Image (cartoon, grey):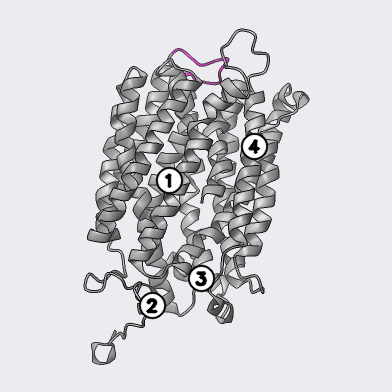
Amino acid sequence: MFGTSIPINLIKGSMLFFYVDLLGMDAAVFAGVYAVYGIIDAIDNPVFGYLSDRTRTRWGRRKPYLVVGSAVLLLASIALFAVPGGVASSATALVVWFAIFAVLAEMADSLINANYGALLPELFPAERVRASANAIRQGCQLLAMILALGLTPVLAQNVLGCPVDAAGCADPTVGYTRLAVIFAVLGVAVILYMTFGVHEDPQASHEERPPFLASIRQILTNRYFWTIGVVNACYGSAMALVLNGLQLYVRYSLGGGGLDATILQVVVVVGAIGMLAVWARLVRRWGAERTWKRALPIAAVAFAPLFFVQDLLGAVIAGLCVAVGYSGVLATNDLIMARVLDDDATRHGVHREGIFLSAFGVLGRLNGLVVAAALASLTLFFGYRSGATPGPNPDLAFRFYLSVYPVILLVIGTVISRFVHVPGWDPRNPDAGRDGRTGAAGERVEVLRGDLGD
């Protein structure tokens, strides 16, 4: 999680700022490319998951794809921020370059996460152990976010490059280019090191290979796909807006620079790390479902103060509110998904975590369309087009982008979650996980069926 989060958070957190505000790409054009990016991001997920579930090698089902995906991610994430001068000076060439390497980076991310995400329910079948493992990996993700999201503005603008508005700054993009190389190499090195240390469940290689069309049909008719999947999509879209627009919010709404953006992002992420242990304890006490349903409305309300703050101090306080709700959903989301995977394996007798998670990812990764629509709305309603043409009121534009839109999305997700009953948790046996195994000793729990007709 630490390795995958470093290059991806640099991309998601700085791509909009880099191409639109620094290189001058029209925001509407960026939105169009990002919409295509979102569609491809959704389509390739079930394909990668299906291939992963059906793969049988002596190295396991997931490891070969993690290796291939990391190599592609290394090249694509560096190229995305290493735009040649000739390309940057041509509007058409810049769009083509952006489209090619943004899509390649996205596909690599999909390939990695389709396989990495499938390992959580496989390696940790008991919910309490799973909750602890998930808290650790989410903590690692947040640490990576401090590096690749929180520190990026100050590293790229003040350490490895020059401030955007500073006199004598000939090329404000050079810091981002250097940082992309550093983060890509670091992230991929961690991915590969961890990949070769993973021991997959050997029993999985003897299972029947899941058929594609039958699997898709069963997933699409699964009620959890259309409820939990949409809730996750709302949450993912809200966070995608924040990652993309925070540096622009700091610049236009708060009047700050790279250091201010770093301070705000680091405070939010550190706050989320601190709250993660609290939410993990609540999961052990209440269960994943109850905790998840309480975290969602908190996350929705938490974004509202960002619309009203006027300075960095106010934004930091508002950001800490965001951290509380964000860490709550972060601590429970994957546990909810793992419960659905356990239920599917019990019903159909085959473990197909890859394709199931990837099908859920179709809804979640369509957040590219939401981001594209939100960005296009800034041009339509507020006249924002680029750093060179910010329009008459970029302050209000990015207050809407970073506050109002996430609140709307998370309120929708909260309402839908009220109608969801997540399968698989028995309060009489909180350690039980997949197939009745317990987390304490790995013993089988006999399920009495017989006359109950279960």
Mark 3 vs mark 2: in front: 2
Q: Which residues are magenta?
A: 383-392
Mark 2 vs 4, N-terminal side = 4
Name the secondary structure under disc 1: helix
Q: Residue 361, image x and y in percent? A: 49, 55
Mark 1 vs mark 2: in front: 2
Q: Which residue is mark 1?
A: 236
Main secondary structure of the magenta stretch: loop
In percent of the image, x 43 and y 67: which residue is there? Answer: 124
Identify the amino acid type marked 4: Ile
Mark 4 vs 1, N-terminal side = 4
Name the secondary structure under disc 2: loop
In percent of the image, x 54 and y 30: which residue is there? Answer: 152
Q: Which residue is mark 4?
A: 182
Q: CA distance from mark 3 to mark 2?
A: 22 Å
Q: CA distance from mark 1 to mark 2?
A: 34 Å
Identify the amino acid type marked 2: Gly
Tell whether 242 sits left or right of 21: left
Contact flag, marks 4 and 1 (Cβ < 8 Å): no
In percent of the image, x 57 and y 53: which residue is there? Answer: 110
Contact flag, marks 3 and 4 (Cβ < 8 Å): no
The image shows a total of numbered marks equal to 4
Mark 1 vs 2, N-terminal side = 1
Which mark is drawn over residue 442? 2
Identify the amino acid type marked 1: Gly
The stretch drawn in magenta includes residue 387: yes
